[in-house]
């Protein structure tokens, strides 16, 4: 296997090169496009690190949804052509910042190269515990997310809700309650509608598949939810669906469902399994899938709402 | 060079580039891009820690990988909030600068 | 055989990397996006080739995800290209 | 590690406001206000009971979430310091909520309004995040708590939507994101080195290696950016001065203390194996510079809210003197107590002063200090609060500020580190200057036009908070013993 | 049998490489956006198609083979649609 190292080095150089380009590019949009390419390449790096779960998340969220967010933002800023930008810093600050960045990168590289060997790992403990009676999962990542570090995962869903509310809160007072502006102003071409009509259902299928196999194979609620979110955005970009009104009760419930169900099951654990956020031995796996299903819903709704932005127009 | 070491070097370089952009670029959207570069560099460090933690019979340590998944979603949420603020700022004032001097003068009324 | 698959992946990566020069050069935003599109397709091909050579499990799902998102950024870009083209009359697609 | 009896309360202290957030978001703005106010007594009772349990057992209270102990699972842990901070949060957050009722009421005729929903949910979120920061015993769990705090605090800064508040919020967000990611990078390195993120386990395993030093530097830099310690303070004054008064009170009084608390946790609990002398000297120097520099800038501010915000920059500086003082082999306990009394005194005094500044701005229609002539006669209670709060900032008796500085000076004496007395005393002198700048014109002759009479209840809330800041001067000896519960004997490298 | 499969894979993937190469050359050398678009959309879809074709006999089970085909179909559809959309937007922009 002498080809593999060469491939890895090439990929690494490419990632670093594209990253440097996004920082150095003069044109704002060029650097945004560079970032989208960068997200794609990162997914490949994650596969090389034996992290298909992360690669999926990175492809869907880091590259895909973030890419759309940034492309949209870049184009909207271009439309405000008069927008006045601050002055770039002077040479002294640039040199200082460069020295600081080089120092941090150098220290980091050195530390990473000298990480202890053999490396400490929770892998055996996690795999054993994941397959055990308290969880019954074949994918240890899902077990970590929903069982051992469930508290993190639940709170991180609350962070998503706060982010949605934060995005809404920068809108105008008069617009409160209305829907965000559609992702596309002009009525789309037939070809785009056709594309979305095909992609969205296939993507729905794939997203649900990835969520469903996630208990035992790579995949899970985050990855499935992120793909569903992307498909929702595809439908919105073809105007097959419109962003909902932000005061819609259904929308609010969908956003809250994931963390709320998680919280309720977690508290019920005190009665059912003697511990908060513990799962009763015989029901662990179905309960985990139950929680995950609602999390998929919340993620699939929250990400597109974050991209759509604050409410727009009049609520009437 | 095995992939973990290589990825570690990539991660360090990404953190460096991103940090430089975060400090030096005057445009807030570009600062946000730079932040995302730093973020992915940090996630890569988690990734190599996970890969190095590949104990007997396991391809990776799941705990750091799970943390990266959490982190990616949080970083996206932060980007969305920042984009909303930037767009609103540009629309409301015609400026997309964070330079404090631009905001101490009381002349923003006529901008847009 | 694995060596061949990996070499093929390497050649594809190198090829599309050269194509990325279009992101640098432009001249139009459309050209930059085409380069990303090429990178996306090539990336999927390289991903599949590497996965089949190194037998990392679950990579076919990653490829599915990437394939679903292949047109994602371009669609977002087109939203604004069309809107900026002047016929914002909500009238339709006919030129 | 096993759970203590009553440990489940720790989880509920976090989950209660989280449940409030979810319910409020589903039910809408009007319900959000009611839920927040209903949570106030529950939260206070929980914090009080946790403090009681810690005091009774004299040892930290621990809960292992899901019954899955670290390193794989997550634990929560309350010691004397966390319980004290939780009680402080449980007093200040409800006070701000009560104060904000009039401004952030949902107007009649609409089902929900932007400002009301945002304010009430974010206030609960700040509370949840702070409780988790005080209780968290896992470094990644604490990262989630820090993010929760950021996402709650930033929208409060720009809640009134003016462009300069949007710019302040964006600047704050970028600093906070830099802080989080820098912290997270340190977390990644520590996991890579030791295979656990549990604070207790790490504290036992860590040795002074380059990896640990790098991680410590990254995490500290991130936390300092969030705490706004000089020279990373530039985001704070515009953010805190532009937020509505009730939000400023919580942001200045509590939110910056969250990341400060984590800096303490990091150095005294996670990294006791590191020789503390050099990092403590650096942190103390930055703190001393902040105390002097922030006070000088406060002296030059034309507006009251900006002055109070710069005073926060200065007062944060004092907090960092706890690193050299509490890590010294002699007088460490005095320094630790002094630091915590300073945290509390500043939290209550600053919250009271921001609320008073809000009352003042609404009553006069402006907060330009040059136009305060005669204002003390028109608004005696508010200026009484400002004056008493100023007393604590200056460190004059009888006040918590005095108590804090007295303890710190005694710690200086005990450990022979006289150099730290310079910022303590110099900063107090400068604080006298800027408090005089507020009070002197107000007490002078003149007539101000009062546009709207302030509600007595709001003035009383602020006065009550400043009362707590003063009462700290009379804290019994038992209180200082309580703060020490669970404190590791720090400065392992030194002793 | 396995030698035959290997031969087939090498042939198909090798042909795929050629099309990726051609696509990149087109992207870099052709004079304007429309012709570049034309070169790109043909080449990279065929390239990925041939790579997928070469990998199908190596799939471990029918589901994996199906996934490979779906990947290709998705990219083909995305590529064709976006090429048409970009082309139309470009033409409209030129008028």
Image (spheres, grey):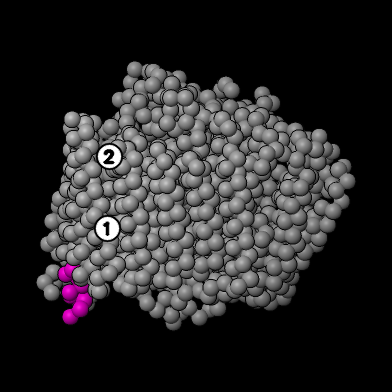
Circle 1 sits on which residue? E21
Residue drawn 21% across the image and 50% down it: E15
The vertical placement of A71 against E33, above or below, is: above
Marked residue chain, label 2: C
**Residue drawn 18% across and 53% down?**
E46
Cα–Cα span, label 2 and label 1: 24 Å
Q: Is the N terminus of chain D in the top left, top right, bottom left or bottom right quadrant?
A: top right
Instruction: Examine the rendering and report whether any part of residue B27 can be seen.
Output: yes
**Chain to which mark 1 belongs:** E
Residue D414, image x, y percentages: 87, 42
Tell me where residue D181 appears, x and y as whole percent: 52, 50
Identified at 83% across, 44% down, the residue is D411
Above-or-below relation of D33 to E22: above
Query: Label 2 belongs to which residue?
Result: C60
Q: Foreground residue, A87 or C49?
A: C49
Nearer the observer: mark 2 or 1; the answer is 1
Q: Write the start and end of the magenta stretch as one range.
A: E86-95
x, y percent for residue A294: 30, 37
């Amino acid at each position: 296997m002498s080809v593999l190292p060469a491939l890895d080095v090439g990929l690494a150089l490419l990632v670093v090169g594209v990253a440097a380009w996004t920082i150095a590019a003069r044109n704002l949009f060029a650097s945004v496009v560079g970032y989208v390419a960068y997200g794609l390449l990162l997914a490949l790096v994650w596969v090389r690190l034996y992290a298909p779960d992360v690669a999926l998340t990175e492809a869907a969220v880091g590259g895909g949804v973030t890419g759309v967010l940034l492309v949209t933002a870049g184009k909207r800023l271009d439309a405000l052509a008069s927008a006045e930008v601050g002055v770039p810093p002077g040479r002294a600050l640039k040199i200082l910042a460069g020295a600081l960045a080089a120092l941090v990168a150098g220290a980091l590289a050195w530390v990473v190269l000298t990480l202890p060997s053999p490396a400490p790992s929770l892998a055996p403990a996690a795999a054993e515990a994941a397959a055990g009676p308290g969880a019954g999962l074949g994918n240890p990542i899902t077990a970590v997310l929903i069982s051992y570090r469930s508290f993190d995962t639940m709170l991180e869903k609350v962070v998503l809700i706060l982010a949605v509310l934060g995005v809404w809160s920068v809108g105008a007072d008069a617009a409160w309650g209305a829907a965000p502006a559609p992702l596309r102003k002009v009525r789309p071409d037939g070809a785009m509608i056709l594309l979305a009509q095909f992609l969205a259902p296939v993507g729905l299928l794939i997203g649900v598949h990835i969520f469903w196999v996630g208990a035992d194979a790579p995949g899970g609620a985050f990855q499935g939810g992120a793909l569903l979110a992307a498909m929702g955005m595809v439908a919105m970009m073809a105007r097959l669906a419109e962003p909902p009104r932000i005061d819609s009760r259904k929308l609010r419930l969908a956003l809250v469902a994931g963390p709320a169900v998680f919280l309720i099951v977690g508290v019920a654990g005190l009665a059912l399994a003697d511990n908060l956020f513990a799962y009763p031995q015989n029901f662990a796996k179905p309960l985990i899938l139950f929680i995950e299903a609602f999390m998929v819903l919340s993620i699939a709704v929250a990400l597109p709402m974050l991209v759509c932005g604050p409410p727009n127009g009049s609520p009437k | 060079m095995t992939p973990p070491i290589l990825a570690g070097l990539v991660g360090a370089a990404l953190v460096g580039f991103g940090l430089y952009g975060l400090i030096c670029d005057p445009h807030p959207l570009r600062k946000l891009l730079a932040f995302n570069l730093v973020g992915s560099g940090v996630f890569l460090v988690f990734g190599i820690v996970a890969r190095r933690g590949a104990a007997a019979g396991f391809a990776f340590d799941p705990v750091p990988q799970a943390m990266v998944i959490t982190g990616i979603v949080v970083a996206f949420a932060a980007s969305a909030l920042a984009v909303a603020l930037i767009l609103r700022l540009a629309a409301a004032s015609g400026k997309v600068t964070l330079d404090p001097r631009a905001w101490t003068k009381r002349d923003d009324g006529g901008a847009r | 055989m694995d060596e061949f698959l990996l070499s093929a992946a390497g050649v594809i990566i190198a090829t599309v990397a050269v194509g990325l020069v279009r992101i640098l050069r432009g001249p139009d935003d459309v050209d930059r996006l085409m380069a990303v599109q090429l990178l996306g397709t090539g990336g999927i091909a390289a991903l599949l080739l590497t996965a089949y050579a190194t037998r990392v499990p679950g990579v076919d799902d990653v490829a599915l995800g990437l394939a679903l998102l292949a047109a994602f950024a371009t669609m977002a870009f087109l939203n604004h290209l069309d809107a900026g083209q002047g016929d914002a009359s909500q009238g339709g697609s006919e030129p | 590690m096993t759970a203590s009896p009553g440990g489940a309360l720790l989880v509920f202290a976090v989950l209660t406001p989280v449940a409030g957030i979810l319910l409020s978001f589903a039910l809408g703005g009007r319900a959000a206000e009611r839920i927040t106010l209903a949570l106030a007594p529950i939260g206070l009772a929980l914090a009080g009971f946790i403090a009681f349990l810690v005091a009774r057992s004299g040892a930290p209270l621990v809960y292992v979430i899901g019954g899955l102990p670290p390193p794989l699972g997550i634990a929560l842990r309350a010691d004397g310091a966390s319980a004290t901070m939780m009680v402080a949060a449980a007093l200040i957050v409800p006070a701000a909520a009560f104060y904000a009722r009039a401004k952030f009421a949902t107007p009649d005729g609409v089902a929900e309004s932007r400002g009301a929903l945002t304010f009430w949910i974010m206030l609960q979120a700040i509370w949840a995040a702070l409780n988790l920061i005080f209780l968290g015993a896992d470094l990644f769990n604490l990262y989630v708590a820090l993010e929760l705090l950021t996402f709650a605090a930033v929208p409060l800064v720009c809640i009134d939507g003016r462009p300069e508040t949007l710019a302040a919020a964006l600047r704050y967000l970028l600093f906070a994101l830099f802080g989080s990611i820098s912290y997270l990078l340190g977390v990644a390195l520590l996991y890579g080195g030791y295979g656990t993120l549990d604070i207790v386990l790490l504290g036992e395993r860590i040795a002074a290696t380059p990896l640990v030093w790098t991680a410590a530097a990254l995490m500290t830099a991130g936390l300092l950016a969030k705490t706004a310690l000089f020279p990373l303070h530039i985001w704070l004054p515009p953010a805190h001065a532009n937020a509505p008064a009730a939000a400023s009170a919580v942001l200045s009084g509590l939110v910056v203390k969250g990341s400060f608390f984590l800096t303490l946790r990091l150095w005294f609990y996670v990294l006791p194996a590191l020789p503390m002398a050099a990092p403590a000297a650096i942190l103390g120097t930055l703190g001393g510079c902040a105390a002097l520099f922030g006070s000088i800038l406060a002296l030059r501010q034309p507006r009251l809210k900006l002055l109070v915000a710069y005073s926060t920059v200065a007062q944060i500086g004092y907090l960092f003197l706890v690193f050299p003082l509490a890590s010294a082999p002699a007088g460490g306990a005095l320094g630790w107590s002094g630091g915590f009394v300073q945290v509390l005194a500043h939290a209550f005094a600053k919250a009271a002063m921001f609320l008073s500044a809000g009352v003042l701005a609404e009553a006069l229609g402006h907060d330009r200090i040059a136009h305060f002539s005669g204002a003390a006669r028109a608004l005696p209670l508010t200026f009484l609060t400002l004056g008493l709060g100023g007393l604590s900032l200056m460190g004059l008796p009888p006040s918590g500020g005095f108590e804090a500085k007295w303890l710190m000076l005694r710690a200086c004496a005990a450990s022979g580190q006289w150099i730290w007395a310079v910022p303590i005393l110099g900063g107090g002198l400068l604080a006298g200057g800027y408090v005089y700048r507020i009070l002197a014109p107000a007490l002078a002759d003149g007539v101000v036009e009062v546009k709207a009479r302030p509600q007595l209840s709001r003035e009383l809330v602020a006065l009550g908070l400043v009362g707590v800041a003063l009462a700290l001067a009379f804290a019994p000896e038992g209180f200082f013993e309580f703060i020490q519960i669970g404190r590791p004997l720090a400065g392992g490298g030194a002793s | 049998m396995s030698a035959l499969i290997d031969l087939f894979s090498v042939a198909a993937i090798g042909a795929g490489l050629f099309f990726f190469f051609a696509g990149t050359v087109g992207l870099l050398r052709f004079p304007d956006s429309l012709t570049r678009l034309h070169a790109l959309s043909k080449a990279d879809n065929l390239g990925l198609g041939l790579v997928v074709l070469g990998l199908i006999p190596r799939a471990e089970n029918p589901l994996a083979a199906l996934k490979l085909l779906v990947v290709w179909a998705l990219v083909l559809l995305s590529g064709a649609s976006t090429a048409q959309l970009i082309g139309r937007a470009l033409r409209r922009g030129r008028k």
